[in-house]
Image (tube, helix red, strand yellow):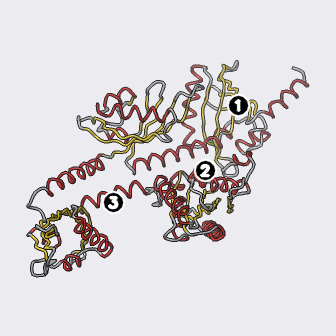
Amino acid sequence: MSELDVLQLTQLITQIPGAVFQLLRRPDGEWAVVYVSRGIQVLFGVDAAQVGDDGRGLINRIDPHDRRLVREAVDAASASLKPLICEFRVARATDEVAAIRCHAIPERAPEGGVLWSGVLTDISDLKAVETALQENEERLRLALKAANQGLYDLNVATGEARVNDEYALMLGYDPHSFHETNAAWIARLHPDDHETTARAYREYVEGRTADYQVEFRQRTRDGKWKWILSLGCILERDEEGRPLRMLGTHTDISERKRREQALAESEERLALATRHNGIGIWDLDLRTRRMVWDESMYALYHVSKDAFSGTEAAWRATLHPDDLARADHEVREAIAKGTPLETEFRVCWPSGEIRYIRAVAKIFHGADGTPQRMLGTNIDITERKQLEIALRHQAHTDHLTGVGSRGFFMEQAELEINRAARYGNALSIFMLDIDHFKQINDTYGHRAGDRVLIALADCCRATLREVDVIGRIGGEEFAVLLPNAPEQEAADVGERLRATIAGTAVALDDTTIVRITVSIGITTVQAGESDVDRVLKRADDALYEAKHLGRNRVCVGRPAPMARADEATAPR
C-alpha cells in the first residue's frame, strides 16, 4: 500500500463515528495496542498518541462491574474465532461514564495470541433513551397495578395477546404460566355475552362508534363468572383498513354489577311491598286533615307516637325544605283530580339524618263524590337513591379531574343552547387545550400528565362561577359553558382564566415543578341559534386559531370564518 493510500485510509477512518482499533491479546493474556484511531479520545477521554502500546490503559477504563463480563465474552470468542459484539461502560478522564458498543473480529496472530480488529461506538444516548423507556413502562405498570387494571396488547391477525400480571390475576390465573389468545378469551366468554361483544367490536372497527367499550362476563379459573369492562383502541391497521393491533384495559366491575342487581331487586321488593298492608301505612282524613300512622310509619320517620301530633302540618314539618313545596303540591293535585299519588321526597329525622321516602296513595270519595280519605304507603328507598346518585355521578363525572364527563357536558350544552335560543339569554362557550401537553407526558410520564390535568381542573373551578359548567372533552381538552355571559364578559373571563393557569405552578413530585399554558377559543351563541354542533365547532375553530397564533392566548370565534383552510390543521 502506497503512502498516499495509507493517508487516504487514515482520513477515511477519522470520519467513522467512534474509534477503530487493533489489539493483540498475547498468549500470556496481556493486551498490546497495535492501532487505535483518534476517535478514542472522544470515547475514552484519552489522546490516541498517549495510549502507547500497552493495552492495560484502555482495559482499565472499563467499568469494574462490566470487566468480568467483557473478559468472558472475549474468552469465548477467542476460542471459537467468532465475531464479538458486547457493551460496557467506560470512565472518561472527565469523570463522565459513557456506554460503549464493541464490534470486533478475532484472528490468530502469526506470533501467537489473538489479533482483534474492530470498531467502538458511543451508545450513551441510545442507552439513555432505553432507560427512559424502561422507566416509563415501569410507571405504567405500577399505575395499572395500583388501579388493579389488566392491560392487553392483541395481535389481531394471529390472535396472540400480551397481557400484564393484573390481567391474569383478575381471572384467577398465575401470571407466569398464563397465555392469552383471542380464542381462549372467547372460550371464557359467557354464552349470553357473545353477541353483545361481537357487535361492540364490529361497530368500533367500522367507525360507527368512537370508542371500543363493552361489558361482559369471563369465566375465572375456579369456574365462577366475573364482570369485566373492556376499553380498547386499534393502534395499527393494514393498507385496506383491517385491524392489526389492538391495545386496551380490563377492569373488574363485578362489585358495580352486584350493586346494580341489588338496585333491581330493591325495586322489585318495593313493588311487592307497596301491595302489602304491613309496610308504612298511613290514612289521611281529608275533612279533618288528620293522619293515622301504623307502627312502621313511626320507624320510617324516626319519631315516637308522643312526638307526632297526627296533623297534616306535622307531616309537612318532617319534609326536607327543598322537597316541601313540590310534595305538598303533588298531594293537593292528586286530591283535586282524584288521581293516584306516586311521589318521592326526603324526610329529616330529629337526629339530622336525611332519608328518602317513596309514597303511593289512592283517593277515596264519599257518596256525594267529594274526596274523603287518602290511603297510602311509605317505604324507605334511601339505599336505592344513594346508589342512583352514585351511578349518576359516576356517569356524569370525569373520574380523574372531577369535572363533568364529555357526555354530561354535551347534554348540558344542548340544554343551555336551547334555553338561550328560547329565552334570549346570553350564553358563551370556551374550548381550551393545554399547550404542549404531549411533551409533558413524554418527558415526565403519564402520571405527571394526570397531575397537570387535575391542576387545570382545579384552576377552572377556582376561577369560574358555580353556575358555569366545566367538562373534559377528551385528553387535555376541556370545555366550559358560561350562562348569561355575553361575548366581552366571556373574553374577560377567558383571559383571567388563561392568566391564572399560566401563573400556577404544578408540583409533579417533591422536586419537580412545571408551569403550563392553555389556548382558549371562545364563542357566543347568536340570537335564535340552536345548532349545538355549529356553536361548538365555532369555539373549536377559535381554539385552533389561538394555537396557530402562538398558543397561550384567547381567541374569539364569530359566525364569520376565522381562519383559512390550511390554518385549521395547525398543530395543537
Residue marked by disc 2: 438
Q: Is residue 157 left or right of residue 424?
A: left
From this viewpoint, which residue is outermost toward the front? 368
Label 3 residue SS: helix
Query: Residue 460: which disc?
Result: none
Residue marked by disc 3: 389
Q: Where, by quadrant of the figure, is residue 396 drawn?
A: bottom left
Query: Residue 119: which disc?
Result: 1
> Amino acid type of disc 1?
Val
Of callouts 2 and 3, which one flags the residue occurring earlier in the amino acid sequence? 3
Residues under labels 2 and 3: Cα distance? 35 Å
Q: Could you tell me which residue is drawn at 32 percent across and 32 percent down?
A: 189
Q: Is residue 387 left or right of residue 165?
A: left
Q: Could you tell me which residue is drawn at 75 percent across and 34 percent down?
A: 36
Query: Residue 369's spot in the image, x, y percent?
Result: 15, 67
Q: Where, by quadrant of the figure, is residue 382 drawn?
A: bottom left
